[in-house]
Image (cartoon, rainbow, N blue to C red):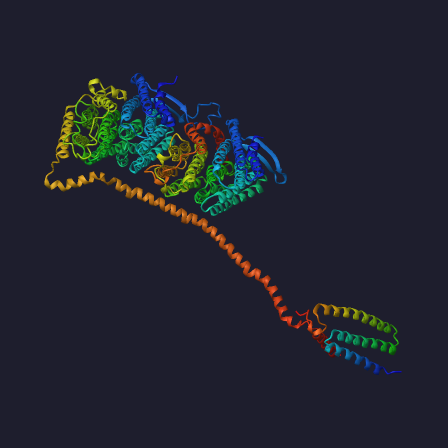
Amino acid sequence: MMPALLWIPLLPLAAFALLITCGRRLGRFSAVVTVAALAGSGGATLALAEPVFHGHRLSVQWAWLSLPAALTAGQAGAGDPRWALGLSVDGLSWLMLAVVTGVGTMIALYSTGYMRGDPRYSRFFAYLALFCASMLGLVLADHFLLLYACWELVGLCSYLLISFWFERPSAAAAGRKAFITTRIGDAGLLAGILWLAWAGGTLRFEEFAALHGTLSGGRLTAISLLIFLGAVGKSAQVPLHVWLPDAMEGPTPVSALIHAATMVAAGVYLVARTLPLFTPESLRVVLAVGLVTHLAAGTVALTMTDIKRVLAYSTISQLGLMMTALGLGAQALAMFHLTTHACFKALLFLGAGSVIHATHEQELGRLGGLRRAMPWTAAVFLVAAVSMSGVFPLSGFWSKDAILLAARHGGPPWLLGALLAGAVVTTAYIFRLYLRCFHGAAASQEGRASHPPHESPMVMVLPMAVLALGAAAVGLAGSPWLHHPLLHLLGVTEPHGGIEAPILLWSTVAAAAGLWLAWSVGVRRARPLPAFLRPLGTRLYTLAAHKYYVDEWYQRVVIGPCLSAARGLSRFDLRIIDGAVNGAGRAGWAVARWKERFDRLVVDRLVNGTAAAVRATGAGLRWIQTGIVHQYLLVVVVAVVLVSLVLK
Amino acid sequence: MMLSWLLACPLVGMLVVLALPKTAVRAIRTVALLATGLALLLSLKLLLAYQPAVAGMQYLERVPWIPPLRVFYHLGVDGISVPLVVLTGLLGFLACVASYAIAERHKEYFALYLLLEAGMLGTFLALDLFLFYIFWELVLVPMYFLIGIWGGGRREYSAFKFFVYTLAGSLAMLLAILALYLRAHTFDLLELAAAGRTFELGFQQLLFLGFFLGFAVKVPVFPFHTWLPDAHVDAPTPGSVLLAGVLLKMGGYGFFRIAYPICPAAAMGFGGAMALLGVINIVYGAFVAMAQTDFKRLVAYSSVSHMGFVLLGLASFTPEGLNGAMFQMVSHGVVTGAMFLLVGVLYDRTHTRELAAFGGLGARVPVYAGFLIFFSLASLGLPGLSGFVGEFLSLVGAFGVWRWQTVVSILGIVAAAVYMLQVIQQVLLGPLNERWRALPDMTLREWLSLAPLLLVVLGLGVFPLALLSVQDATLQRLIAHVVGAIK
Amino acid sequence: MMPVRLVLLLSHALFALGVYGVLTRRHAIGLLLSIELILNAAALNFVLFSRAFGHVEAQAFALFIIALAACEAVVGLAIVIGLARHAQTVFADEVELLKG
């Protein structure tokens, strides 16, 4: 009997295997396979709830690599404990499991409607299943190596799904950008893992807490920062955030699942999981990165005009908020916000997908007044927006408020102010989006006649409704009203007291301010700034609208030099190294040719010269030989006479 | 006798092919397929019958050959050679299947092909240095003709370069072998390994340099690598597969079998240089690959990059590092072999290898696209596929010893993603290039030659113990031998 | 008794005549005849000195010379006939087969 634990990742994996091998024959049925597998995983997760809530830890292990001579010693299967991988579930992972299976099932269900008629319908669900399998594996991993493996696999699925409509060059490029950018972070993560394996001697998460005694602070800081680099890449934090907005080229359910609710949150999960390794110094870095991301991405979201891009920057910003909470050491609060965020952000994306599905349009300027045509979508979108703005008593309020509280008690005084400013911005951009999409006049009528906007089919509305319920109510699980069951699950024994009135007041004011900004500036185009500040305002707006020129900067400082380095090295290889080889070859030929010439001109000529001399002599003497007998005789006679005269 | 039978398979096949009339193309192909298939089966049987727990040599055969010189016909296998023999058997068979695309001079082709396989098998089986050298050189000749006659592009130039370059390398090795013989009066590798430890350091270093030059050209180690892109690009597809899959491994195998056991102290001394060269191979090869526009050239340079991990792992002298190096050799053989087959599939249809000439084939040829994506991912080291295990183990092993070299080589992994995704994007993604509107998908024969490799890559990635358990004990013993020589 | 000097004079004259003939005759048979003269001059000398000094052996040489002359005539005439056949001429100066 396989433990329920194994079923959780294996069900989607089996679905993937089935769909990738015979998906085409299954046709429309492929969606059912994936949805069923995910629902099955969700059921298994629920089955685990009881022991987990009682603080138990369940695990399964097997030897993956087994190096040092374990086999020769005859203890087959035992292997090196360092490389025994396993799955285990505790409160932290259970929460993530619930998010992934819950949101995953809803989004898979939604996709059955959204992707209808796509030529690669079953391929889509295969990738989705593979993604869920690896994401669940990532969450369940009790060993860093297994986590890394799944980490790469979810990156792969993200790549495949972003590039799903690969006929569009922009989609292909976006997928590649996402994979490579996150891989830069992963390189840091890999270095961190290697260092940890070497210095700490263990990669098992449960043993990390003990490492504080054995490793020096500096080393731990370095290792934890390298790990954080991986999280920065995956969770699209500054400065590796550039891939996420482009990733919106993928189908919208993918954006909802991977690029809002689960995979990008894996970075937060990673830091939460390895938090025992983080020293105060590295936490400060986490805090700074999170805060900068939160504010910078929020301001960019204010200026974007593409629905999905607004939501993408909003996701980056909210992930920054979670990182900020982690930087405060508040692991449970970050995970709490992750949970509520998964609900409302997935819902926002699904709502946006519903709009795009209905209108084939995602440019804000050409949308408007959809409230009447799509009442359900408008309603759930509103719920999600309000929840995200942190309005009492929806989910977002509880998680965000808890973070504000932690900032007030655990962080420097300016931190609370910065987070409140972030809250204003958050409300402003999300209501700007909502108002311009669903309210006002129905803009730009051309083309509408053929495509009258319509409410999405039931199979899409239903998951949205379920998620809306979550966006409204999940937060209660972390509220003082129910005595914080969620926080207990995450191991917080003494949660902060109740609702603090000043914080409640401040956050409500922030939400109201944001709402006013969205209404007056975003919709009615008022100009709140006094005249003398306007040039500055325009400047800042341009800066934000160009996403702070990060892409351009990368192009100039990183990509360009890398490509020219590649080209340069290639030329170097061809000209210098291969040139040297060919040069050596040519030198060999040259020597050979020179020797050949010496042979021909000197040695051979000596031989031929001798012959030629003899021949010349002969030719010179030829004239004597006339062939006439009389002459010969005459010579004889004369010679005899002469000889006899001489010898006389 | 098992090893001799294994060695005899391709040789007998060659003789039969030579006896057949030139026009009996079908018969020639069948004989070649049978011979390589039998060799594959025998190598698999060897793998199953091999006892991994016994670290020493198994299936020894020793017959005097040239008694005055004390040369023996001496064969045997251990955990280092078994995986490579199986790799040779597998790729030899699959490349033979791919050889059906050869269109002219079948008789000569298959005779040379079988001779090549015999040479490769012999190199991995020989335990007598003299015999080893003969097999080592024997490989050159058929490969020279395979490139020179059935190749494309500047085939005469490439074949000539390949031949002369590797021959020059093996001359250095020959010098070392002679020096070794004059000193130890034996060619027996096992005796030499025992004797080598007692040599003084200077002599060991000279020997190591000689062997290093011979092996470095084959691996190839930067800066001796430039024969490789030319030879790969101009060789026919099966030639490229064997060149990348098996011939490069002969260099790595030489380090494991000869250079390390015989000159352990020198090997330790040169570890730093080897690690540095490994890193240069990894990063340099990756960056150069990034700039290539020819598909086959790109894969060739990616080979340079991947073989760098073998060097890095070798230089670490740790169990993880050596295991990683061996694993990487096998994995690279399978993955790159498959990549060359894939390039060949595309080239047979389009007669071009320019990456820019393709585009959008993903929708047109989905099966091909699946295979290409799969093997590209294996090549860029995706966890769960075999490439990752080798790279990871090499890095883990090297990290404690060569810290900065290891960290820099991680850059190579990032770069691998860049160039491999570039291939996928330029070939498969984007709008379909209208020139290839009628491009047919993979035939059954091509599918059959790639599917086993896919299974191997996936199997080794998910269950690396399958290979590690075969080689680990032997490698542990090698490390004990090398490290023990220092103390 | 003939004085030796006279006979010597005769033989010298014969010899000179022969040499003259050899050098001037164009006809091959003339050449042969002249050579015969030279040989007879030599034979005469042998006979003369044999008488004068009492050496009988020298007379044998005279006989040798006669035999030799016969042989020479045979070979010479054969050459002449061959020449006439081959070169269509019997004049010695018109043949230059030995010209280098």
Q: How many marks?
A: 0
Q: Nearer the viewer, residue A590 or A382?
A: A382
Q: Where, quadrant-wise, is the C terminus of chain A in this rendering?
A: bottom right
Image x and y of residue B292, in percent? 38, 43
Q: Is residue A82 above or below residue C39?
A: above
Q: Nearer the viewer, residue A349 or A236?
A: A349
Q: Is residue A428 in view? A: no
Query: Residue A66 sits in which quadrant?
Result: top left
Image x and y of residue B38, in percent? 53, 31
Q: Where, quadrant-wise, is the N terminus of chain A in this rendering?
A: top left
In the image, taking residue A453 as reference, residue C7 lies left or right, namely right
Q: Is residue B273 above or below residue A337?
A: below
Query: Residue A413 sits in which quadrant?
Result: top left
Q: Nearer the viewer, residue B148 or A584?
A: B148
Q: Is residue A48 above or below residue B298?
A: above
Query: Residue A52 sits in which quadrant?
Result: top left
Image x and y of residue B470, in percent? 48, 29
Q: Is residue A588 in view? A: yes
What residue is drawn where x is 36% and y is 42%? Answer: B356
Q: Nearer the viewer, residue B136 or A60?
A: B136
Image x and y of residue B139, in percent? 52, 40
In the image, taking residue B463 as reference, residue B138 lies left or right, namely right
